[in-house]
């Protein structure tokens, strides 16, 4: 790393991509001085030289970077708008040429690099600087950020590509809270809903019911590999499943854990139920602050969230898809490193479930293709390894008791003595579902009996 470039430097060109991004004739045209140019000049006229000339970026060593499938590439931005790869000293004419070259080293089948969405300048994607330039100098011009001449399909872990456009449109449309703020989303009560396939959705439609459920796709179905591995503690599942069983109303909580950039492993170690009503926005900030403090004290990071569909399928709604995308963007933040955000949906009382166990669905959202920023994100199923804990921790037991107290006497508290099926009470159904997340130490069943006794007296 940091080696001096060879002399003369090797200039790498990639199949005409940089030519499409260069202004015709290789000259810098001052489009701001030409009346009527706004309707004619598209993104093809915007190059790094243009951004340098207009002061949106500055040349510097190591100011450019690419993150792809766990690999990081660092580049220098030269005064002439070209890119020098620090590792080898090779010179690239455009972001597309550099991104394509680097990604092919990791994935030889990669056709193109989607350079403006993949390359970051001081931690921010170049596509954001291009957007700023367009807003400043071409406010009435064509604002499409589609990468002409680049492959429209995003590769295995290019989940970051196109997020700048999606994030801007989502925040303008929904007035999202500021970055890193935990938000609770109010949802209506569950009813029987028939899931639809993602391919039937098309572009966003304000007339479409935001509670429409969407079937999950597989990563392989969209020509992707899952870009990270996930391990979930059995105590996380037990506490989450218990929380979701207590009430006929939808609940939400957050997931704490760790992200290992070396192994690309997301480990979910703790669930943090939100002991508040979704509609109670007055108490939500205090609850969320308490969760943040608990995460900090345990040395954990916020790695995801969960919520319930009490009587419906454990599949994401259109609203869930937008919420998940927003969580992914906020956890990503402005730093250089990629961190995934896991979403989990728990369906405790859906009669389509097999047996007494809840359906638990881990999912993630892939941004829509860059050329279709108004489409919904693509919900995909996440493969997870479940790790059996040795024993039930006092933390989890205490949290269960706090939940019982929170819902005690509530009108939407589940009637545990009622029958779930002709020969099974609701309480027995809960016991059966939680037994699937049992720790290795069999003494847990005696401990939980105390919790179950408290449930019986909660009404």
Image (cartoon, helix red, strand yellow):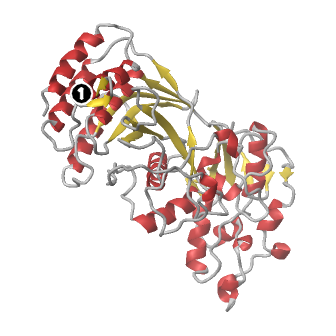
User: Residue 239, how many percent across, how many down?
Assistant: 32, 28
User: Residue 265, how many percent across, how many down?
Assistant: 54, 29
With respect to residue 371, does 291 lie above or below? above
Say which residue appears at 45% left-offset and 33% top-offset: 353
User: In the figure, residue 381 lies in which quadrant?
Assistant: top right
User: Residue 73, how many percent across, how many down?
Assistant: 67, 42
User: In the figure, residue 81 lies in which quadrant?
Assistant: bottom right
Residue pushed farthest top? 442
Q: Which residue is mark 1?
A: 400
With respect to residue 242, does 44 lie above or below? below
Say which residue appears at 41% left-offset and 20% top-offset: 436
So how many labels did they put on this image?
A: 1
SS class, disc 1: helix
Q: Is residue 66 left or right of residue 250?
A: right
**Between 431 and 202, the one nearer to me in the picture:** 431
Q: Is residue 40 left or right of residue 231?
A: right
User: In the figure, residue 395 lies in which quadrant?
Assistant: top left
């Amino acid at each position: 790393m940091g080696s001096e470039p060879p002399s003369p430097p090797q200039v790498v060109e990639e199949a005409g991509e940089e030519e499409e991004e260069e202004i015709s004739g290789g000259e810098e045209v001052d489009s701001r001085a030409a009346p009527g140019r706004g309707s004619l000049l598209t993104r093809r006229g915007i190059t790094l030289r243009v951004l340098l000339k207009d002061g949106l970026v500055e040349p510097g060593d190591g100011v450019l970077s690419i993150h792809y499938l766990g690999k990081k590439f660092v580049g220098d931005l030269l005064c002439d708008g070209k890119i020098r790869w620090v590792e080898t000293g090779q010179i690239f004419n455009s972001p597309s040429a550099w991104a394509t070259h680097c990604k092919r080293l990791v994935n030889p089948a990669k056709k193109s690099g989607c350079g403006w969405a993949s390359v970051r300048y001081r931690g921010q994607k170049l596509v954001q600087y291009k957007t700023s330039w367009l807003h400043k100098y071409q406010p009435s011009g064509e604002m499409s950020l589609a990468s002409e001449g680049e492959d429209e399909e995003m590769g295995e872990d290019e989940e970051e590509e196109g997020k700048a456009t999606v994030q801007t449109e989502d925040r303008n449309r929904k007035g999202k809270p500021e970055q890193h703020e935990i938000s609770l989303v109010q949802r209506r009560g569950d009813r029987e809903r028939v899931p639809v396939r993602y391919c039937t959705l098309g572009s966003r439609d304000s007339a479409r019911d935001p509670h429409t459920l969407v079937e999950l796709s597989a990563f392989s179905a969209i020509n992707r590999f899952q870009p990270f591995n996930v391990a979930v503690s059995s105590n996380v599942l037990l506490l989450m499943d218990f929380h979701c069983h207590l009430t006929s109303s939808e609940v939400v909580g957050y997931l704490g854990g760790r992200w290992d950039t070396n192994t690309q492993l997301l480990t979910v170690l703790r669930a943090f139920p939100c002991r508040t009503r979704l509609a109670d926005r007055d108490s939500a900030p205090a609850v969320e602050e308490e969760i943040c403090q608990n995460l900090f004290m345990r040395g954990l990071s916020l790695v995801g969230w969960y919520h319930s569909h009490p009587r419906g399928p454990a599949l994401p709604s259109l609203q869930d898809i937008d919420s998940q995308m927003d969580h992914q963007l906020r956890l990503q933040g402005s730093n250089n490193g990629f961190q995934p955000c896991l979403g989990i949906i728990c369906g405790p009382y859906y009669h389509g479930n097999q047996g007494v166990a809840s359906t638990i669905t881990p999912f993630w959202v892939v941004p829509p293709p860059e050329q279709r920023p108004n489409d919904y994100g693509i919900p995909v199923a996440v493969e997870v390894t479940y790790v059996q804990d040795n024993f039930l921790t006092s933390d989890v037991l205490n949290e269960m008791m706090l939940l019982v107290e929170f819902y005690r006497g509530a009108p939407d508290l589940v009637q545990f003595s009622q029958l779930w099926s002709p020969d099974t009470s609701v309480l027995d159904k809960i016991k059966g579902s939680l037994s699937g997340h049992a720790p290795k130490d069999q003494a847990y069943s005696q401990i939980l009996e105390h919790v179950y006794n408290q449930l019986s007296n909660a009404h």
